[in-house]
């Protein structure tokens, strides 16, 4: 379909909730989205693309046709969207791991049901719990639940092996109540299993209340042995609820989310809290387009994270939301959980502090897993997007002018290869056309002219041309440099580096005055600031060297017998004019002939005549 046909089809959609599927020419689903009003949402894709993100423009360019599914409510759209994302794995959706990456706990359906850990749910009559976190943690937690309730973990089969032989070592160690003994009933076994189910469903507090009431009833009936056994199980379950090794989120009242976009990798962290205590943590790396904001990422991730799960917390804290996502997710999860699930974004107080802690967890995990090469690539890709370059810049050249009043006007050219300085390509210039007449704009034009002329002449020291010119200064400096580039027919983009009150580069500016803020992006801000400081340092260093030579040269001018060679010898030996002035004839004679030494001494001590007795 053409763009006009797609726009016409989108405009014919109703203003009702639903899900849309974008497809390419082969019929492959490349994006799945939900909308409160399908017409408004879908038609936006085929309007003017100026306001679209880079990801959206790229996706729309591949759309050949689309399909829609109408639903009766917004949260139904959320459920269907998640299901379709799982089924099609669209290229332009944020995708978490498939459920098979997370373990489930399976409870078989038989007279003596058993728990086991499996990779995914099957279409059978068994009960499934999960998906949970890692396999190791899930195995530990399941073993802990069975041990707390003293359920069998051996390989004996019930009822076949009941009474067939003596109880195993677990019974004698107090880890199992020996359900292989004839006196243990199937009813007691199933009651214990149901208690384990309550734990796996996160109902530990309710279970403890019920067991406490049962223990008190047994004690009142003077059945102290049974009451003591219940007391031991209550203590074990109470300790279990506080163990850090319990399945993350197993007993959680609250989930706290943090999300972090790092240099190359994104990561989310979920902290699971039970009665104010940290019960567990989950982190996962994922990929997302650079222009995807935090709310959009959370909208995609949280739906995929929670909808397949059987155990849900009572409260979920998010750092941001997108288009009413919190309300929709709350409704869906409340229906699934059988209790209210409150999804919201706290703005202040202790809960906001917990969100910051979760963000730090996500940041640490993302940075730990990111290589230096990924950081470099990510930073350059960000810079490419901000400056609208055709590709990430491989070579950048930066220029600065330094002078003292009307003299010693110099310039520096600093080269960066990627994010690292290429010092072998640095160049220095002494301004030739403006002696005694400082003019930063004219100086910059002279430097760029000489630099581009050397490149045009084939001088390998000035090749290749960079991908970007960065000029220390504002719009006028950038415009002066652009004028030179245009004279040479060079199309390298030119940007000025605009400083703030602390002399730090706060923005880049185009020759026509458009400012591009960089402060909000730490990676780019650090890189541009580093380039600006290095360029300034190199210019200042050259200027100081030049000024020092100039000052020495002027102080020694006109002394008989002191030409360029002896002037340089004196400068190298004594370092400063002050040291030369304070030296006596004998000391000077160690560097230059005695007659010249006397002339130098007389030059600096005219009132003392010809007295060289010092």
Image (tube, rainbow, N blue to C red):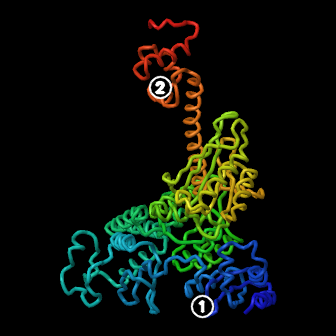
Is 170 in front, or is 601?
A: 601
In the visual, does 611 lie left or right of 18?
left
Whether residue 291 is situated above or below residue 44 in the rendered picture:
above
Marks 1/2 in contact by CB < 8 Å: the verdict is no
Is 609 in front, or is 25?
A: 609
Q: Which residue carries the number 1 mark?
A: 28
Q: Which residue carries the number 2 mark?
A: 570
Residue 530 rendering spot, x and y as whole percentages: 57, 50
Residue 556 rendering spot, x and y as whole percentages: 56, 24
CA distance separating discs 1 and 2: 80 Å
Under tag 1, what secondary structure?
A: loop
Whether residue 1 is situated above or below residue 97 in the rendered picture:
below
Whether residue 489 is situated above or below residue 82 in the rendered picture:
above
Location of residue 28 by image quarter: bottom right
In the visual, does 179 lie left or right of 269?
left
At x 52% / y 31%, what residue is drawn? Answer: 564
From the image, which quarter does the C terminus lie in?
top left
At x 65% / y 56%, what residue is drawn? Answer: 520
């Amino acid at each position: 379909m053409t763009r006009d046909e797609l726009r016409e089809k989108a405009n014919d959609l109703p203003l009702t909730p639903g899900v849309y599927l974008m497809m390419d020419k082969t019929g492959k689903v490349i994006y799945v989205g939900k909308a409160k009003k399908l017409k408004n949402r879908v038609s936006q894709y085929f309007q003017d693309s100026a306001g679209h993100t880079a990801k959206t423009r790229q996706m729309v360019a591949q759309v050949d046709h689309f399909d829609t599914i109408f639903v009766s409510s917004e949260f139904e759209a959320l459920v269907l969207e998640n299901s379709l994302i799982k089924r099609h794995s669209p290229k332009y959706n944020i995708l978490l791991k498939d459920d098979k990456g997370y373990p489930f706990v399976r409870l078989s359906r038989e007279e003596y049901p058993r728990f086991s850990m499996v990779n995914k749910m099957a279409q059978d009559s068994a009960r499934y719990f999960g998906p949970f976190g890692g396999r190791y943690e899930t195995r530990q937690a399941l073993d802990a639940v069975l041990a707390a309730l003293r359920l069998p973990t051996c390989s004996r089969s019930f009822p076949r092996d009941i009474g067939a032989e003596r109880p195993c070592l677990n019974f004698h160690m107090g880890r199992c109540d020996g359900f292989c003994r004839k006196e243990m009933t199937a009813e007691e076994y199933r009651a214990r299993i149901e208690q384990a189910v309550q734990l796996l469903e996160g109902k530990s507090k309710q279970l403890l209340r019920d067991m406490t009431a049962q223990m008190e009833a047994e004690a009142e009936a003077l059945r102290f042995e049974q009451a003591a056994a219940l007391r031991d199980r209550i203590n074990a379950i109470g300790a279990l609820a506080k163990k850090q090794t319990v399945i993350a989120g197993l007993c959680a009242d609250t989930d706290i989310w943090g999300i972090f976009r790092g240099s190359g990798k994104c990561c989310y962290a979920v902290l699971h809290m039970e009665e104010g205590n940290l019960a567990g943590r989950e982190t996962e790396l994922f990929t997302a387009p650079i222009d995807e904001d935090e709310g959009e990422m959370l909208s995609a991730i949280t739906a995929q994270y929670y909808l397949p799960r059987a155990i849900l917390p009572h409260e979920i804290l998010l750092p941001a939301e997108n288009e009413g996502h919190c309300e929709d997710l709350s409704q869906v999860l409340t229906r699934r959980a059988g209790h209210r699930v409150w999804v919201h974004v706290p703005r202040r107080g202790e809960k906001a502090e917990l969100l910051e802690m979760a963000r730090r967890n996500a940041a640490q995990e993302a940075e730990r897993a990111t290589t230096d090469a990924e950081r470099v690539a990510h930073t350059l890709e960000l810079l490419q997007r901000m400056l609208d370059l055709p590709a990430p810049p491989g070579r950048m050249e930066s220029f600065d002018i330094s002078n003292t009043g009307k003299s010693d006007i110099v310039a520096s050219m600093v080269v960066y290869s990627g994010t690292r300085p290429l010092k072998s390509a640095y160049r220095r210039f002494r301004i030739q056309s403006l002696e005694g007449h400082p003019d930063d704009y004219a100086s910059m034009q002279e430097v760029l002219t000489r630099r581009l002329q050397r490149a045009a002449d084939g001088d390998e020291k000035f090749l290749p041309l960079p991908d970007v010119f960065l000029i220390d200064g504002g719009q006028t400096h950038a415009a002066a440099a652009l004028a030179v580039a245009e004279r040479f027919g060079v199309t390298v983009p030119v940007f000025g580096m605009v400083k703030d009150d602390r002399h730090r580069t706060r923005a880049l500016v185009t020759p026509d005055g458009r400012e591009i803020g960089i402060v909000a992006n730490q990676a780019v801000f650090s890189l541009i600031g580093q380039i600006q400081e290095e360029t300034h340092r190199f210019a200042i260093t050259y200027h100081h060297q030049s000024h020092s030579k100039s000052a020495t040269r002027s102080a020694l001018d006109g002394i008989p017998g002191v030409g360029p060679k002896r002037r340089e010898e004196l400068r190298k030996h004594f370092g400063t004019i002050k040291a030369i002035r304070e030296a006596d004839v004998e000391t000077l004679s160690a560097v230059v002939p005695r007659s010249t030494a006397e002339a130098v001494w007389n030059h600096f001590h005219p009132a003392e005549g010809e007295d060289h007795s010092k």
